[in-house]
Image: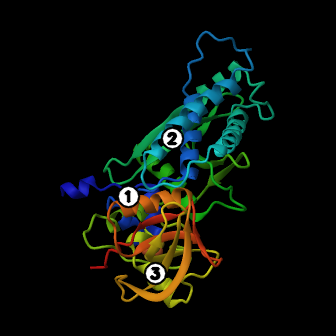
């Protein structure tokens, strides 16, 4: 019973479960978490916007302009540095790219454009945004970075912004749940996983506020400064079914390998035998310009990063590795080299998982973006 109470499902965990139940299960096994530049960038931008929605403007004149860009930049810088620190303290990480700072600023500008438009003055630049206009926005802001939880504690989510939708005559038309998105903007409509997430926010909010006005739920995409509305019936029932199916178990959940699950982003391949068997059986192991592989390292020069790798193949469903005798020159550089050296200095011997190595050349390249981890597949039972 106590365990059941402790089990809570978030929209991202639900999405992982829908992508591949094993991916969800592995994400709950306290395996080394992977830091990523895109995620850090997104977090810094989110936090800087949340900061701007919680500022105290007391004592400032409504007419004042030119204050927003420097303040926005200061918040972003502070959050950027915080994220960088967290990123660098994560052992499983690629390289921190300082040049992404411009990208972060661009994302923040995209978010500001939507906020200014929402405050009632689209077309006004951040520089020309007056304190009065921002006050107007703050008056419409009901909550920032709030935690949403159903009363039974089964479903939860972190809401970015909750606004009152007030028209020009001052009438309240409803609430808007706004989720800031720093990824690629949708071409036509929201992706099913985003749709699911946004609707879940709406439904948790409604379950806790039965007398709420009409609630609209939107993804705010910084890339094109466009708001996309998610519409559809309640997803609470489906979410509760997923909650039921994701209760903690010692036995790994089913794996659904394939191009959309393993072929997308799965951070847990070093612990999963299924992508490897799927690739092997479908004849796509090592195909493509970048590929995942399991190797034995026969030689490694710590100075140059050059080595010799022997390619392995899966010998059974549990991912036991069999050397094939096929050897390739391999070159490690940047963070890829550091990760290998950390692994070797931990005394690791045996197969190594290499994620996303550049394998379309005579010499494989394991660069700053690659995962280098001990091959430790967790068997199905
Ligand atoms: S590697 Fe593929 S099968 Fe394994 S957990 Fe990830 S998505 Fe699922």
Please name the residue shown 47% across and 45% down the image: 88
27 or 148, nearer to the observer:
27
Is 144 rendered above or below residue 282?
Answer: above
Residue 264 seen in this snapshot: no
In which quadrant of the rendered view does residue 121 lie?
Answer: top right
Please name the residue shown 40% across and 77% down the image: 255
Q: Position of residue 146 (x, y in %)?
A: 46, 38
Kindly check if marks 1 and 2 are in contact, taking CB atoms under 8 A apart as contact: no
Ligand 1 shown in quarter: bottom left
Q: Position of residue 134 (x, y in %)?
A: 66, 25
- Give the CA separation, mark 1 to mark 3: 20 Å
Query: In this figure, which residue is indicated by the disc labeled 3?
Result: 276
Which quadrant holds the N terminus? bottom left
Query: In this figure, which residue is indicated by the disc labeled 1?
Result: 32
Query: In this figure, which residue is indicated by the disc labeled 2?
Result: 83
Q: Secondary structure at mark 1?
A: loop
Which quadrant holds the C terminus? bottom left
Residue 180 seen in this snapshot: yes
Side of 70 where 210 appears, left or right = left
Question: Residue at the left extreme?
Answer: 1
Q: Position of residue 253 (x, y in %)?
A: 34, 73
Please name the residue shown 73% across and 31% down the image: 120
How many discs appear?
3
Near mark 3 (Cα within 10 A), the count class, few <14, some 14-19 or many ≥20, is many
Near mark 2 (Cα within 10 A), the count class, few <14, some 14-19 or many ≥20, is some
Is 345 rendered above or below residue 19?
Answer: above
7 or 150, nearer to the observer:
7
- Give the CA separation, mark 1 to mark 2: 18 Å
């Amino acid at each position: 019973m106590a365990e059941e109470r402790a089990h809570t499902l978030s929209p991202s965990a639900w999405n992982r479960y829908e992508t591949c139940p094993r991916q969800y299960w592995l994400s709950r096994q306290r395996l080394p978490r992977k830091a990523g530049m895109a995620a850090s960038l997104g977090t810094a931008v989110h936090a800087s916007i949340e900061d701007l929605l919680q500022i105290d403007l007391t004592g400032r004149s409504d007419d004042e302009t030119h204050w927003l860009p420097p303040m926005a930049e200061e918040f972003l810088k502070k959050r950027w540095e915080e994220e960088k620190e967290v990123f660098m303290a994560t052992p499983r990480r690629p390289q921190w790219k300082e040049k992404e700072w411009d990208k972060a600023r661009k994302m923040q500008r995209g978010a500001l454009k939507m906020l200014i438009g929402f405050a009632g003055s689209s077309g006004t630049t951040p520089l020309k945004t007056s304190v009065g206009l921002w006050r107007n926005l703050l008056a419409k802001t009901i909550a920032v970075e709030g935690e949403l939880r159903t009363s039974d504690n089964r479903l939860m989510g972190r809401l970015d912004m909750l606004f009152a939708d007030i028209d020009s005559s001052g009438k309240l038309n409803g609430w808007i749940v706004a989720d800031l998105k720093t990824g690629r903007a949708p071409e036509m409509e929201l992706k099913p996983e985003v749709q699911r997430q946004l609707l879940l926010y709406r439904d948790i909010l409604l379950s806790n506020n039965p007398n709420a006005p009409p609630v609209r739920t939107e993804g705010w995409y910084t890339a094109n400064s466009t708001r996309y509305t998610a519409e559809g019936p309640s997803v609470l029932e489906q979410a509760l079914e997923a909650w039921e199916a994701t209760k903690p178990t010692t036995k790994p959940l089913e794996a659904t390998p394939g191009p959309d699950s393993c072929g997308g982003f799965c951070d847990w391949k070093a612990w999963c035998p299924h992508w490897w068997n799927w690739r092997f059986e479908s004849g796509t192991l090592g195909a493509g310009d970048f590929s995942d592989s399991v190797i034995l390292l026969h030689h490694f020069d710590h100075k140059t990063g050059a080595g010799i790798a022997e390619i392995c193949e899966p010998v059974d469903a549990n991912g036991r590795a069999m050397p094939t005798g096929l050897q390739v020159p391999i070159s490690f550089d940047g963070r890829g080299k550091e990760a290998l050296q950390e692994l070797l200095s931990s005394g690791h011997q045996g197969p190594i998982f290499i994620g996303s190595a550049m394998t379309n050349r005579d010499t494989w390249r394991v660069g700053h973006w690659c995962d280098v981890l001990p091959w430790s597949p967790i068997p199905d039972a």
